[in-house]
Amino acid sequence: DQQVKQNSPSLSVQEGRISILNCDYTNSMFDYFLWYKKYPAEGPTFLISISSIKDKNEDGRFTVFLNKSAKHLSLHIVPSQPGDSAVYFCAVYSGAGSYQLTFGKGTKLSVIP
Amino acid sequence: DADVTQTPRNRITKTGKRIMLECSQTKGHDRMYWYRQDPGLGLRLIYYSFDVKDINKGEISDGYSVSRQAQAKFSLSLESAIPNQTALYFCATSEPSGNLNEQFFGPGTRLTVL
């Protein structure tokens, strides 16, 4: 049973518009959430994270929102750029000192010039 | 130079062959991990190591073994490869006291078992 779900396999957005990528999780014990970006033929690279004590974290064009009651987080990219085209993975840690990252299946974002 | 390197980058082998995938890192991290990614799926943890003397099974360790030869080196072996082990394999490292448990990934090894 998937603990981390990214229900949209793909998303297309026009350059300059907002991209919203969504992630749902099942376990309320999860307390640390990360987004990774992956280009073809490369390993995933860390993008942004959020702790369960916060509901928002912002880094430049990237903002992650966490809704603990809904067990939902989202990544907003504003404005979207063609170089943002990649697969985005949501990942979670399950508690203090946890070592295992659990990944979603990923969402492929295509930003159209 | 890349901080986390993996060799080989691509490998085609036959069922029953023994295969070793190697990972080296220059980040000085104690923790190292092996993941596999299958098409349309997220990354799944195979094995992880917190230091040279520590080896732990992950979610999908059956059919795999690992060796932590040094702080900087962590190898993954398939003793007798089978076709359903065809996948993209990633090595990763992290610092226990690092920035929010971020893991740093290598470029991946694409393994095909015929």
Image: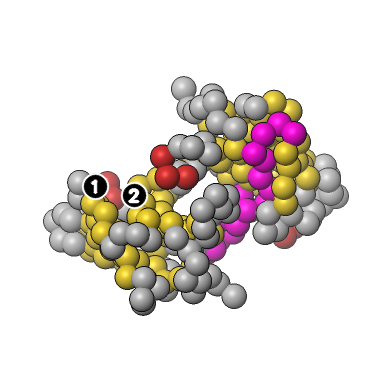
Could you tell me which residue is drawn at 47 percent across and 59 percent down?
A: A92
User: Residue A23 placed where, x, y %?
Assistant: 39, 68
Secondary structure found at label 1: strand
The span from disc 2 to disc 1 (Cα, nearest Å) is: 7 Å
- Counting every numbered tag in the picture gives 2
Q: Quadrant of residue A55?
A: bottom left
Q: Quadrant of residue B84?
A: bottom right
Q: Residues within 10 Å of mark 2 (few under 14, many from 20)?
A: some
Query: Looking at this view, is A41 or A60 the one in front?
Result: A60
Could you tell me which residue is drawn at 46 percent across and 22 percent down?
A: B1
Q: Is residue B44 magenta?
A: yes
Left or right? Give the position of B31 relative to A64. Answer: right
Question: What amino acid type should be assigned to the residue bearing mark 2?
Answer: Ile
Q: Quadrant of residue B43?
A: bottom right
Mark 2 / mark 1, whichever is N-terminal: 2
Which quadrant is home to the C terminus of chain A? bottom left
Secondary structure that dominates the magenta span: strand
Query: Looking at this view, is A67 or B106 the one in front?
Result: A67
Q: Is residue A5 magenta?
A: no
User: Residue A31 placed where, x, y %?
Assistant: 44, 60
Could you tell me which residue is drawn at 65 percent across and 27 percent down?
A: B71
The colour style of the image is secondary structure
Question: What amino acid type should be assigned to the residue bearing mark 1?
Answer: Asp
Left or right? Give the position of A44 relative to B69. Answer: left
Q: Which residue position is annotated with label 1?
A: A59
Subunit under mark 2: A
User: Residue B28 placed where, x, y %?
Assistant: 54, 26
Subunit under mark 1: A
Query: Looking at this view, is B43 or B58 the one in front?
Result: B58
Q: Which residue position is annotated with label 2?
A: A48
Q: Are marks 2 and 1 in contact (CB under 8 Å)?
A: yes
